[in-house]
Amino acid sequence: MDYVHTPVLAEPALQHLIPDPAHPYMIDCTLGEGGHSALFLEAYPFLNVIGLDRDETIMAKAVSRLGGFGDRFTAVNTWFDAFLETYEGPAPSVILFDLGISIFHYVESHRGFSFSKSERLDMRLDASARTDAFHIVNTYSEQDLSRIIFLYGEEKYARRIARAICISRSEGEIVFSDQLASIIYHAVPANYRFQRIHPATRTFQALRIEVNGELERIVPSLHRAIDILAPGGYLGVISFHSLEDRPVKHLLKEREKGCICPPRAPICTCGKTSDISIITKKPITADEAECEANPPSRSAKLRVARKKGGENDV
Ligand SMILES: C[S@@+](CC[C@H](N)C(=O)[O-])C[C@H]1O[C@@H](n2cnc3c(N)ncnc32)[C@H](O)[C@@H]1O
């Protein structure tokens, strides 16, 4: 089987997320084609990996890739927030999130993630979900379209794009990804059409985030991940844009800080304690060689935190 996704920041992830033989479990919350999981399973013969992915098509690729590891690997077709919320299994010593979607989704899924292909606007990771990108593009009000394109795409021409979508759909449904890309292309000012990225990039990102509820799943999942980690265990989060990275950074700081009482309060009344140490004071990014070999890694940031209570804690 061919694998189209190259795992990003694989070396730094292996260097910083060190499984503990006393807690020989890792949860790979974003299994994808299983690239990261394969590396960890190969590097640590004692390790068992539970891999999660809501997309059953890509998960099937990972299951086939990792079948040779026998019962050291288990795949679960689920949203990571839903899984972690009810997880009662053994405490893992590594939890990894590699957020967003895979190259697989752009090149092989046929679900309209790519503006350079002519595919039905779908963008669902969960094939049973009711709302797809077609529904959003063809039924959301102009105001709601503008809001999501601005918020989830950080697109400065969100209003113009939303207006153009509404005008176009009044003449007939917008069905295909290249059709939408062309509407966006013609909606933005001429000089915006020739920037580093295609003018539809941000709108497509926004639609994908809205379809899959991507952002709202991050914070509860990270809190829960820290709660279930074994003492001394590692949490790694790879993000690809500031909408993902910002909440990760704030949450890690909050969990590291502990007490949030006002500085002049005579005693602590909030009861919060610091339960992690941030290992990466600045996020790890891809070096030149990796950026060259695997262009999606250019925007990747890895943040790592360690749960307190491990043997070597001071
Ligand atoms: C960036 S890819 C992971 C690539 C993987 N690390 C590899 O090396 O092949 C992210 C994967 O997570 C899945 N995904 C994204 N958000 C998810 C969520 N909230 N719950 C479960 N799976 C999710 C996507 O379907 C996608 O396959």
Image (cartoon, helix red, strand yellow):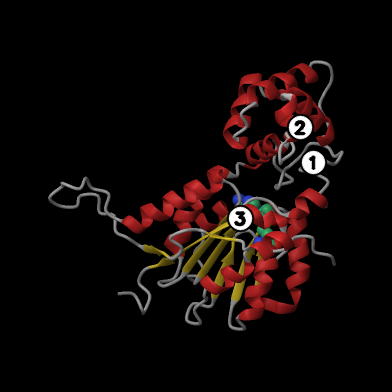
Q: Are marks 2 and 1 in contact (CB under 8 Å)?
A: yes
Q: Residues within 10 Å of mark 2 (few under 14, many from 20)?
A: many
The image quadrant that residue 231 belongs to is: bottom left
The label on residue 300 is 3
Image mark for residue 134: 2
Q: Is residue 309 visible?
A: yes
Tell me the amino acid under the disc marked 1: Gly
Residue occupying the point 52% across, 63% down: 236
Report the number of numbered marks: 3
Q: Position of residue 150 (x, y in %)?
A: 60, 30
- Per the model, the C-alpha gap separating discs 1 and 3 is 23 Å
Mark 2 residue type = Phe
Quadrant that contains the C terminus = bottom left
Q: Which residue is mark 1?
A: 112
At horizontal 65% and vertical 36% (from top left) the residue drawn is 206
The residue lying at 50 percent from left, 58 percent from top is 283
Identify the amino acid type marked 3.
Ala
Please indicate, yes or no, whether residue 54 appears anywhere in the rendered image. no
Q: Is residue 75 left or right of residue 175?
A: left
Residue 312 to residue 61: above or below? below
Tell me the distance, in whole angstroms, between the alpha carbons under discs 2 and 1: 9 Å
* Pointer 2 residue Cβ closer than 8 Å to ligand 1: no
